[in-house]
Amino acid sequence: AQKITQTQPGMFVQEKEAVTLDCTYDTSDQSYGLFWYKQPSSGEMIFLIYQGSYDEQNATEGRYSLNFQKARKSANLVISASQLGDSAMYFCAMREDPIQGAQKLVFGQGTRLTINP
Amino acid sequence: EAQVTQNPRYLITVTGKKLTVTCSQNMNHEYMSWYRQDPGLGLRQIYYSMNVEVTDKGDVPEGYKVSRKEKRNFPLILESPSPNQTSLYFCASSFGLAFTYEQYFGPGTRLTVT
């Protein structure tokens, strides 16, 4: 069964520092996608970045990058030059190939990131 | 603007009083899904739909119903709400089923059942 593990319930970082949020996943499928979402205190889910299992390069989107280590089954989110507005809950999620029967995003428990001025 | 809308955003109700949370998307997406979010558990799927008139159960379907009569709408129905259904609910949609497609989320509906 698919599973996502985020081992950091909370993190505190100084503004302008880089931060890495950990995510490990478990799947027996070869085809899958990994996603990171941000949930600010207002509650909405904001898509940040995507990495496909066959992508050889790490995904990047502005200040966000995904450190994808397939053999270790990890997909850590790196935020460079953190800002106060980055304070939020962050979720790692995985979607498997629907041919294998998967029809959903599986989410981790989330990491609450707090940026200190 | 491409978006998923949900109504109401906040709802306080009493045990046993039927309610419907509406969800609509304007992106012509085939796939739609409902999730609930509870502290420490992340988001869990309730029901999903692959197209009009095609729906199926997710991980936590007990106590919920859905319908998909039109492509854009996917309402969530609680026939007899109970306090354990107090949660934050999200509707989501994506263009298709492939794992490469991101899911777009609605703003969430915070439901309290007393």
Image: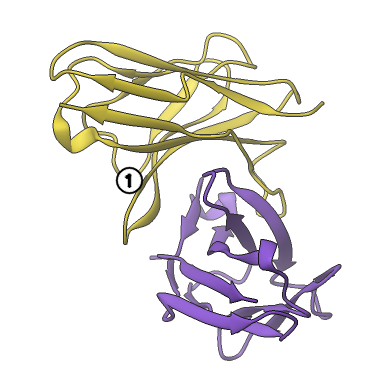
Chain colours: A purple, B yellow
Q: Label 1, on which residue?
A: B59
Q: Where is residue A76 in the image (x, y as percent from the top left)?
A: 62, 80
At x 79% / y 79%, what residue is drawn?
A: A58
At x 50% / y 34%, what residue is drawn?
A: B108
Q: Is residue B73 above or below residue B104?
A: above
Which is nearer the eye, B58 or A89? A89
Q: Position of residue A37 (x, y in %)?
A: 61, 57
Q: In which quarter of the image is residue A29?
A: bottom right
Which is nearer the eye, B97 or A12? A12
Q: Where is residue A97 in the image (x, y as percent from the top left)?
A: 60, 56
Q: Position of residue A6 (x, y in %)?
A: 45, 75
Q: Is residue B32 above or below residue A26?
A: above
Is residue A69 visible to us here?
no
For mark 1, name the chain.
B
Q: In this view, does B92 lie to the left or right of B57?
A: right
Q: In this view, does A32 lie above or below A28?
A: above
